[in-house]
């Protein structure tokens, strides 16, 4: 089974906010985020998929998700490129 690490963004007033997660189904997960069924942080906003990367292992995907969550400079760079 494949797992994906993803980055989504949303506009909040004059500021862009982002969220990083992992999933086995990106389309379904984005729909959940946009329908207030995702993580608590993502509720009430319209989210746009900015970045994703596929991994063959859940453990590796979780490690990469953690790295991206903590690396705000990389997150900002990815958002600015899109």
Image (spheres, rainbow, N blue to C red):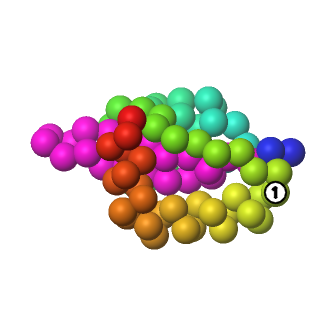
Q: Main secondary structure of the magenta part?
A: strand
Describe residue 68's horizontal placement relative to residue 18 as left or right.
right
How many numbered markers are drawn?
A: 1
Image quarter in which the N terminus is found: top right
Q: Is residue 45 left or right of residue 26?
A: left
In the displayed structure image, the side of residue 19 where residue 26 appears, left or right: right
Question: Is the residue marked by circle 1 packed among few (<14), some (14-19), or many (20+) residues within 10 Å?
Answer: few
Asked if residue 25 is among those painted magenta in the image, a careful observer would answer: no
The image quarter containing residue 24 is top right
* Magenta residues, start to end: 3-22
Give how far across and how far down residue 9 sits, in percent. 37, 42
Is 24 left, or right, of 33 in this rendering? right
Residue 7 locus on image (x, y percent): 49, 46
On the image, the x and y values in percent for residue 50 come to 46, 38
Label 1 residue SS: loop
10, 60: nearer the viewer? 60
Task: Name the residue furthest left.
Answer: 14
Residue 47 in sight in this render: no
Please give the name of the residue rendered at 49% of the width and 53% of the height, measured from the top-left corner: 20
Rendered position, 21 above or below 24: below
Q: From the viewer's perspective, is residue 81 above or below residue 67?
A: above
Q: Nearer the viewer, residue 67 or 58?
A: 67
**Residue drawn at 70 percent across, 58 percent down:** 61
In depth, the one of 26 and 73 nearer the eye is: 73
Q: Quadrant of residue 43?
A: top left
Residue at the image position 74 percent from the left and 63 percent from the top: 60
Quarter the C terminus occupies: top left
Q: Is residue 66 above or below residue 2?
A: below
In the picture of the structure, the residue carrying the numbered disc 1 is: 57
Query: Can see residue 76?
Result: yes
The residue shown at (77%, 65%) is 59
């Amino acid at each position: 089974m494949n797992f994906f690490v993803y980055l989504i963004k949303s506009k909040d007033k004059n500021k862009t906010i982002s969220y990083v997660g992992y999933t086995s189904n990106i389309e379904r997960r984005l729909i959940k985020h946009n329908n207030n069924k995702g993580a608590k942080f993502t509720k009430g906003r319209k989210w746009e998929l900015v970045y994703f990367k596929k991994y063959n292992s859940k453990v590796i995907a979780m490690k990469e998700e953690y790295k991206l969550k903590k690396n705000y400079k990389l997150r900002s760079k990815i958002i600015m490129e899109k």
